[in-house]
Image: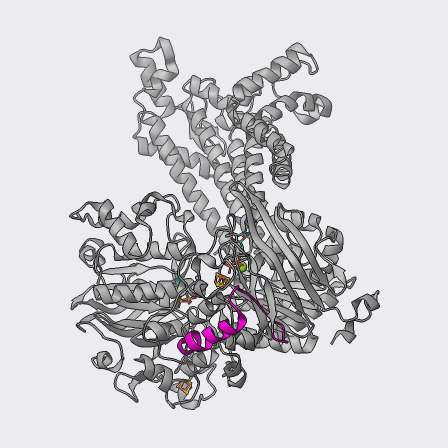
Amino acid sequence: MSTTTSAEQTGKEVAGGELLLETRGLQRYFPVTQGIIFQKQTGAVKAVDGVDLSLHAGETLGVVGESGCGKTTTGRLVTRLDEPTAGSISFLGSDISHLSRAKMRPFRREIQMIFQDPFSSLNPRQTVGTIIGAPYDIQKVKTETGTKKAVQTLMERVGLNPEHYNRYPHEFSGGQRQRIGVARALALRPKLIVCDEPVSALDVSIQAQIVNLLEDLQEEFGLAYLFIAHDLSVIRHISDRVAVMYLGKVVETADRDELYNHARHPYTHALLSAVPEADPDAEDARERIRLTGDVPSPLNPPSGCRFRTRCWKAQEICAAEEPPLMQIGAPGHQSACHFPEERDVV
Amino acid sequence: MGRYLIRRLIQAVFVLVVISAITFFLFWATPANPALLICGKNCNAETVAQVNATYGFDKPLVVQYGQYMQGLVSPGGRTIGSEGNERNCPWPCFGESYQNGIPVWNSIKDAFPATLWLALGAAVLWLVAGVMLGLIAALRKGKFIDKLSVGLALFGVSFPTIVFGYLLLYLFIVKLNWIPFPDTANAALFSVGPVKWLQFYILPWITLALVFAALYTRITRANMIDTMNEDYIRTARAKGLDERTVVFKHGLRSALTPIVTIFGLDVGGLLGGAVITEQIFSITGLGKFSIDSVLSNDLPAIMGVVLFAAIFVVLANIVVDVLYAVIDPRVRLA
Amino acid sequence: MTESVTSAPPADTRAGKPFLEVKDLQVHFPTDDGMVRAVNGLNFTLERGKTLGIVGESGSGKSVSSLAIMGLHKGSKAKVTGEIWLDGAELVGMSVPEMRALRGQQVAMIFQDPLSAMHPFFRVGDQLTEAFLVHNDAPKAVAKKRAIELLDRVGIPSPDKRFFDYPHQFSGGMRQRAMIAMALMCDPSLLIADEPTTALDVTVQAQILDLMKDLQKEFNSAIILITHDLGVVAKMTENVVVMYGGRVVESGNVRDIFYRPEMPYTWGLLGSIPRVNRSGDGRLKSIRGTPPSLINLPKGCPFQPRCDYQEHVEGANCSTELPELLQIGQEQHRVRCHIKSEERRQLFTEQIKPSL
Ligand SMILES: Nc1ncnc2c1ncn2[C@@H]1O[C@H](COP(=O)(O)OP(=O)(O)OP(=O)(O)O)[C@@H](O)[C@H]1O
Ligand SMILES: Nc1ncnc2c1ncn2[C@@H]1O[C@H](COP(=O)(O)OP(=O)(O)OP(=O)(O)O)[C@@H](O)[C@H]1O
Ligand code: SF4
Ligand code: SF4
Ligand SMILES: [Mg+2]
Ligand SMILES: [Mg+2]
């Protein structure tokens, strides 16, 4: 999977460009078991089933897809909050797929995560200072100026008032709480932050503030983001490259504008055509792809192409053979469909 | 469900075996020589040896445990006593009391009804009182009646049972004479008639129920307040349902679910004996029996009561889990 | 389209009156910290067969207002004043039993969070039939038939089987559809949908919005659609109310709001959304500052602490005088701002529009 072209392809300036993260055939099956004492595996939720991703320093990879397609699970695997059942994750060349807690520790500093829900991901009984300072304690990092000073600098950087060091999360608004999450993730100057729907719960103007903040921080610290969201407009705004997932697999990946303008996979077309635009005339004029058919279960995914139960272009071959991710169109554009065609949707 | 139950029952047996092993080895491994406990002051080497032979203390502990379990498992019970003086101890054999030689199971059988009546009566009382008070308090949150029940609950939780029991006893029996002094130590419903039976049990019930009622008031109130703030309650109102349906059908149903669990476990626990209450009112139930056994170092009796109580706790756990699954469809028994 | 409802008794007093009219609605909550003024003088009207969008920042009083229309503040501490006229009946002063008869029947609501809005212990089907049986003296079988029919209409596959499922056996999108079916059980003439699709991904969202449109056509119902998502507003609504700090700051038809907005907050709102059809480099424009405290609302314009256009005001003081919600032009376009209308229009075309 070649992605070396991504830096030149996007208009954005991409720092360095050294290969930061690479996953190969990443897989996570959740066993479905019966029995309490003597457990017997009766099946598996194939939450992530063979995902190849690569991410360069300073780059943002957007991940979109239907609810339940395995986005969060992928994020948790990459941060090693969860262990893959197969496949490999390498970070700066070292294989971290199955590292023990202790061996993982130095990598934890480099890979951080921001969670979706700004309301439940912060401990209500801890002060903001404690929350943001926690990574220093866990990693036993000594800061030159003392933890408090360091935390206050961070707070200032993400747009929080440093005087609010001793306040509790409930005294902050949703947007401010998400800033606390950002500050916590930034504390150890990581190279990669996995953002799991960081703005979904926020309203548009606060969403804009957080997106801007993330972009500024990226520029300042050369951060790479794995940015998960279901809002395709936000993804388009923030990403350099985008991966579209469907039922545990990446079905299409390309540089941002290539994906939005020249998508080849029918599922990507359906997704893009479903985004409502903030423009009444355009909305009236637009033709939308209505998906019908059964939504398949990750317990028992369809044979061949996983999208075939809802795909309007499905042929016999789609049930028989699984389409591989193949290079098509511009460099770095890969699509997993037997009949890839462009279509005007946005 | 059927397979689930069978598995749970097998599990329960397993748990009981473990409990029996632990208690057995704990008690019998006590430094005190059981033989000395039995012959008491007139012990000499000869009597000790004789007792050892009678009770099998000369055999290794594991063998003794095996024999003990045999008595519980084999349908014919087991043989106890020394050679020449063997007798059958019928199933279920918990051994014979060191105190008086009566099979422990007989004593348990005799003591259990009193405990059962005490626990069930009190349970009904505290459940009704607790849920009602909690419900009223929740629906009138912040009003006088709420503050009153919260106060009562605090009082109930913190008032020591022993003081409360003696207070009731003194007030209603000794001072006011409303209730005759309990003359039968073990009032069976059918032999004494319902009036006497009630008179006998009413004060113990209240005594035992007080703490529980207070706890249940608190739990019901808290659950009910949480539930009534749930979105689905708002949905129910938005459908145009009247408040009674909203509260009793939609609200209480969820608020009571956790209470079913606690209630099952509480009742299950009490069936092993309510020590303090039985002591105060001289009820010869399991609680009193176990106190007496402990005081006299009657190991087989203690073992027997512990195991018997454990059976109820384990069973209560199963009943509660099944009930919970019946009430809450999200819980799947597998 | 009001002909279909002329069966309402005092038909003459209804003539020319809108189907739904909210007049000077105020909702205040007494709390330990002080009075939370969640809604302060809300006005709008809505006809049958039309959709009104309510947009505004989180905490601007959208949900609280819709709960007031449902009469769901009755019996709580909330103080509700003003008038809500629905089909000739006034709802604010209505007694609880009278209101109960309307709920579900005339006015129904789809709540913000479908995951928590259904009772976890009752079967989906029973929750639907219950909504029907409160208002209709009909046998259970009739209710069941209707429920299955509606589940089918909202696109639940094999509804006769799924009727017996519990909510947790439905996925998020299916639960949302079941909520819609529940709201439609009695053919309500007014449907309030509070963020009906915020938790859903775009494909499911599109399905649900299409469905609501289809059903509206069929039943000629009025819909109030509350959402953060301006794309959804553009797609679904004819008229829009923009709320800020518990007040309407701009209202009008959807094209006025999207193409000719005149209130600085609306500009900020439109400016802060990323567009899916444009490659967005550069920064998103966000509205600086934070939403006002509803306990200490600014005396003047509620948006004043965050507004960048105050220098264009002549002859008024934004921080002390509350601008009125004034109609501009002939159409029902109303704006609450001290800047003169021509100047606002000029500002929009010259400064705002190019960067949208
Ligand atoms: N701990 C778990 N045990 C079993 N199944 C799980 C577990 N975590 C996730 N799954 C399943 O794995 C699949 C993928 O879940 P995941 O949370 O990654 O989806 P997602 O793409 O993040 O969806 P969303 O957009 O709704 O957040 C789902 O079918 C989910 O039910
Ligand atoms: N019962 C209550 N007591 C006190 N304040 C309340 C109560 N209910 C709502 N509020 C306050 O009223 C304000 C408006 O709330 P509302 O739920 O209407 O916001 P909203 O516009 O729907 O926001 P969102 O988009 O986040 O749903 C909020 O500041 C909220 O905190
Ligand atoms: S491979 Fe076949 S079923 Fe799959 S997306 Fe392409 S056309 Fe559709
Ligand atoms: S009235 Fe003043 S503060 Fe308010 S929006 Fe207009 S210019 Fe801004
Ligand atoms: Mg997720
Ligand atoms: Mg709301």
Residue B255 showing in the rendered view: yes
Q: Would you place residue B277 above or below residue B309 in this image?
A: above
- In depth, the one of A279 and B130 nearer the eye is A279
Relative placement, left or right, of B125 versus A94 is: right
Residue at figure coordinates x 51%, y 71% from the top left: C262
On the image, the x and y values in percent for residue A146 come to 19, 45
Q: Would you place residue B306 above or below residue A291 in this image?
A: above
Q: Quadrant of residue A303?
A: bottom left
Residue at figure coordinates x 43%, y 28% from the top left: B303
Q: Which residues are magenta?
A: C329-356
Relative placement, left or right, of C220 versus C304 is: right
Relative placement, left or right, of B116 versus A95 is: right
Residue at figure coordinates x 73%, y 56% from the top left: C99
On the image, the x and y values in percent for residue A189 come to 21, 58
Quadrant location, the N terminus of chain A: bottom left
Residue at figure coordinates x 58%, y 51% from the top left: B327
- In depth, the one of A244 and C322 nearer the eye is C322
Q: Quadrant of ligand 3?
A: bottom left
Residue C240 showing in the rendered view: no
On the image, the x and y values in percent for residue C41 come to 62, 57
Residue C345 belongs to the span the image colors magenta: yes
- In depth, the one of A196 and A31 nearer the eye is A196
Residue farthest top in this picture? B42
